[in-house]
Image (spheres, rainbow, N blue to C red):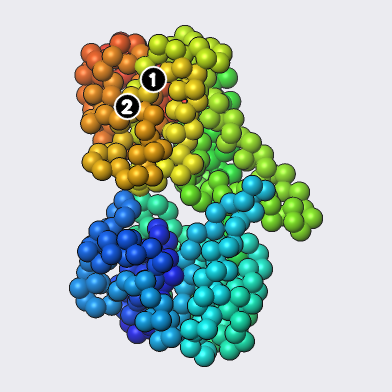
Amino acid sequence: MTTSTVTIVGTGYVGLTTGACLAHLGSNVTCYDIDPDKVAALERGLIPIVEDGLDEVVRSNVEAGRLRFTTDPTTCVPDSDVVMLCVPTPQDEDGSADLSAVVAAATTLGPLLAPGAVIVNKSTVPVGSFHMVGDATGRDDVDVVSNPEFLREGTAVNDFLHPDRVVIGAERPEAADRVAKLYDGLDTEIIVTDPASAEVIKYAANGFLAMKISFVNSVAALCEQVGADVAAVVEGIGSDRRIGSQFLKPGPGWGGSCFPKDSRALVAIAAAHGYDFSLMRGVIDINEQQYERMIAKVCSAVGRYGHDRLTGITVAAWGLTFKAGTDDLHESPSLRILDELERRGATIRAYDPTTRGDLGAHRAERLGRFELMADPLTAVDGADVLVVLTEWPEFTSVPIADVAHRLRGRAIVDTRNLLDPAAVRDVGLDYDGVGRR
């Protein structure tokens, strides 16, 4: 295993997972963050995000002495062979990425870098950002490398340790080799290319996956119009090896921290270079339409239409996060839909496995308008309609007869096609899925 010394800048979802997993592969890793409260919590073994297996990887590598946390870059950066930037790149109003945190980190760390060190862009950054980072360091004796991440929230540890590929964009082969060495022990392809191509790969990959979801949601809408069943259609087209079945599952729309931001950034990058990426704009537009289609399903289920016509209606919501396996509420389709239903006058009674216990200030502020319930059946009590919004497996084990007994209305809107339509109808409830007969 490698014995490289690595500093990870930022202990968010990407930084913490990357640092812990590189330590697992044998590197000596220090995670640096400017937030003293976060660092103090990590030193106590408190993991700030819901991510399967991450707590164990962090704990075992802290105990082994390969993983540390600090708020002082002078204690780690000067001794590091590789420094990875894993800081946020939020979106500006025009869809482009805000690189202020990346530039600030590179500027701060530049004087501390050892001669010959490699500084790595792990954050998702626009094409050409490696030049910007290099300029910000003020150094001509260090290499800048692009090494984009392809981690899925909920399965990030497994994705890191069993990747489809590792992409490294570097101007010098020697710098690429030093980054590739970090991944020794992984059974995967190492793709070495130029920095610009590596940066495009990240955006294009997420854009393509978002396109597949928008495509299948459009197919589901067609199925509803012609009386077809999207489950059969997906089985038929997904069995084609040229297409594949992944990301062909209809739902309420895509969200989270990556797809919305990266899709809009891809359009903005193309526009900045004189190309109208109309296909990607269409993918985004279809996703917006999907939210409206789900809202219309709920209104139809309770026999109400138009704006401000849901007063007196109680909506039971199962799921708030943008997908199962994470506590991430960022651009969650669930919240987009529920916010609009509430704006039209509905009362929202919601349950999500990640909302039990202390929510934290940010989540409490975001969810404060909803009645948060302790379990799925309590959320259903006296509601006019049940809306399944996140595909948490525990929802499939709730006895549907108990739901029918507690639900005041007679309708379930299943935006994830999670429940068995026949079982729902057998207990006398109406079922409306996405593209289902």
Q: Is residue 388 left or right of residue 166?
A: left
User: Which secondary structure, mark 1?
Assistant: strand
Q: Earlier in the sequence, mark 2 or mark 1?
A: 1
Q: Residue at x 52, y 90 (%)?
A: 115
Instruction: Name the residue tied to disc 1.
Output: 347
Q: CA distance from mark 2 to mark 1?
A: 8 Å
Q: Residue at x 50, y 47 (%)?
A: 244
Above or below, 129 against 369 in this view is: below
Instruction: Name the residue tied to disc 2.
Output: 371
Asked if residue 271 shows in the view, the reply is yes
Q: Nearer the viewer, residue 97 or 264?
A: 97
Asked if marks 2 and 1 touch (Cβ < 8 Å), the reply is: yes
- Give residue 205's position: percent from left, percent from top: 56, 55
Q: Nearer the viewer, residue 230 or 91?
A: 91
Residue placed furthest toward the right:
274
Q: Residue at x 50, y 25 (%)?
A: 340
* Quadrant where the N terminus is found in the figure: bottom left
| Label 2 Cα crowd, 10 Å radius (few <14 / some 14-19 / many 20+) | some
* Mark 2: amino acid: Glu
Asked if residue 193 shows in the view, the reply is no
Q: Nearer the viewer, residue 204 or 103?
A: 103
